[in-house]
Structure formats: C-alpha cells, structure tokens
Image (tube, rainbow, N blue to C red):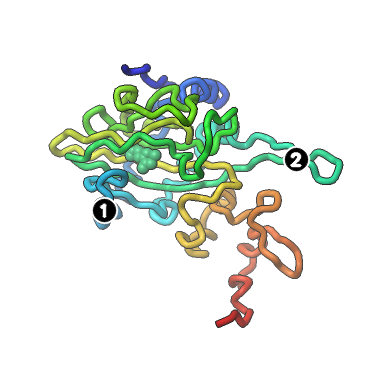
Amino acid sequence: MTTSELARLAPDVTADAAVEVIRRDGGVIIEGLFDTTTVEGLKKDLDPVLDAVETGHDEVFAGNRTKRAGALFARTRHMTTIALNPLYRGIARRILDQPIDVFCGEQPVSHPAGMHIGATMAIKIGPGQGPQPLHRDDSVWLWRHPTHQREARVQIMVAVSDFTADNGGTHVIPGSHLWDDERAPRRQEAVPTQMKAGSALIWLGSTYHGGGENTTAHDHRFGLSMAYDLAFLRPEENPFLTYTLAQIRSLPEEIQRALDWSMEHCLGWVEIGGQMSDPMDLLRCDDFTAIGAGLPGHD
Ligand SMILES: O=C(O)CCC(=O)C(=O)O
Ligand SMILES: [Fe+2]
C-alpha cells in the first residue's frame, strides 16, 4: 500500500515550516531550489567525471548500471552553493544542532551538538538499473530507532536531471522515520521522487529510501547528494584523504569547518605547543605540515 506522496514546498518556505513537514513525513521536496546556472554548471563539471568512472561493482547496493563519484568540493564549485544553501543549512541546523547537557564537575554545561558534512556524491542511474534496497542512511552508525528527536543526518538530493518514476527517482517511504527497528521496509510502501531538475529532496537519515529502478531505454537519472551529520559521528567520506590542503584552503571557512578542519568542543583537536588546538590555526599557517612530520616515527 502506498502511504502518501511527500509534500512539495516552494523555495521561499521558512526553514521552520519545512522542518515541521520533515518531522512529520521524514522528507520533503523543495521545488526549484537551485537555478539553471547551478544545474547546468553541475552537469558540465560532473558529466565528464561520471563518464570516466566505472559503474558500481556491487550489483545490489551500488548498482552495476549506476555511476558514482565523491570528492565533490574538488570537482565543482557549485558544491559550495548547495552546502551553503540557506534553506537546506537552516533545516539541517534546526534538526541536528540541538544542545546536549552534560556535567563538568557539578556544573551542568550545555553543548550544541554541531554538524559537519558526512558525504558528497554524484549518482547517475542508467537504463536497466534495478531498485536499490530500501535502507536508512543512519545505519552506517548502527543508529537505533525511534530516534526520539535525536536525528543523525539531514540529507539533500539535488535533481541535476529530471527525476521521474521511470528513470530511478529516489524511492522514499513517507513516515518511516518514526518506525522502530523491528519493522522491515516494503517496496509497496515506497513512493518515487518525481521532481524537475533544480528541485531537491531533503530527508532524514532515519527515513527508508533507495535509488529507484530505471526502466527507460535511454534516460539517465542524475542526482547530487550530500549530508549534514551530527558533528561527533565519523564522516562517511574521509575528508582528510579526499582533499588536498590547497583545495581546503580555497573553500569558504564554513565549508572548511564542516569538512572537519575544526574543533567541535573537544573533538578534532591537534596539539600545538602543548595546547589542544583548533585545526583552523594550522590552516592559517603558511608553512603547515602535519604535526608528526618533524618527528622521527618508529619502524
Ligand atoms: O540514488 C538515489 O536516489 C539514492 C541513493 C542512496 O540512497 C544511497 O546510495 O545511499
Ligand atoms: Fe541512501
């Protein structure tokens, strides 16, 4: 049984209103979130990248008619437009960046949870690709459900091509973010995401979804996804091995921090002169090398 369609909102919706819908349904479609310049730019930058990679080797999940590429901040400047989109970022911040109270001595201290970028991925689903198994992306951290308001991930899928029911538009089970861990997702409960290029699906890590099947003869479904995750979770895509220092330096500070060149209260420090310091202090040094570079190491 099909539960219901995801709601479709205009790009001038407030982040608060969009969050209300996402908390209710597990996801939402924002129509026309990105302009033609961004969509055309993404296509121009990423088509050659995807042309050059092989289809997935894993038939079931990655998809052997599907092409994927990460490292998107190094591959297209439009990635920054997506990551800093005020609506997407505003939604992610409201859902993820909730304060958490802990004791430090007898004093309760409230820490914002923080958020960072966990993964970037361009995904092109080719003709003949079967449906990806329905899954929750927060299962990478073996997250438990119900989440009791502590969501781990807020993800976006930008339509670079049109998304249709036939070309692999992402299958989503509305309301499934509220399910416990005993209930299996069934294909009949999923609805395909249908949206024009430039629109975007924003959904929670706890919502069951998966790439749809592409039953067309020639149509490639092209989507770009990225995730904001709780800052204290290990990122799915390793930022330190993905980007060179020069590439990181060329990005706006918000992105540098979101790619873990930051210290979120005690996480991510680097020792400089005996102080547990913010990695941003290193980025600002012209002669930066890794702290261990001057040390002898061991055989
Ligand atoms: O391509 C899609 O529509 C979804 C892909 C996905 O959910 C994944 O690879 O985790
Ligand atoms: Fe997924």
Q: Position of residue 16 (x, y in %)?
A: 57, 24
Is 6 on the left or on the right of 275, as rendered? left
- The crowding category of the residue bearing disc 1, from other C-alpha atoms within 10 Å (few below 14, some 14 to 19, many at least 20), is few
Identify whether 20 is placed above or below 296. Answer: above
Q: Considering depth in this image, is 8 or 3 the residue closer to the camera?
A: 3
Identify whether 183 is placed above or below 247. Answer: above
Q: Residue at x 46, y 22 (%)?
A: 25
- The crowding category of the residue bearing disc 2, from other C-alpha atoms within 10 Å (few below 14, some 14 to 19, many at least 20), is few
Please give the residue where the numbered disc 1 appears in the rendered image.
57
Q: Which amino acid, by three-letter code, is at mark 1?
A: His
Q: Residue at x 33, y 25 (%)?
A: 190
**Residue most toward the left?**
217
**Residue most toward the front?**
182
Q: Position of residue 206 (x, y in %)?
A: 48, 33
Is 65 on the left or on the right of 255, as rendered? left
Secondary structure under the numbered disc 2 in the rendered image? strand
Q: Quadrant of ligand 1?
A: top left
> Is any atom of residue 215 visible in this view?
yes
Q: Considering depth in this image, is 236 or 193 the residue closer to the camera?
A: 236
Mark 1 lies within 8 Å of ligand 1 (Cβ measured): no
- The numbered mark at residue 199 is none
**Residue most toward the right?**
106
Q: Residue at x 75, y 70 (%)?
A: 273
Q: Position of residue 36 (x, y in %)?
A: 35, 36
Please give the residue where the numbered disc 2 appears in the rendered image.
102
Q: Which amino acid, by three-letter code, is at mark 2?
A: Val
Identify whether 33 is placed above or below 250. Answer: above
User: Rounded to the nearest whole Å, what is the CA distance between mark 2 and mark 1?
Assistant: 44 Å
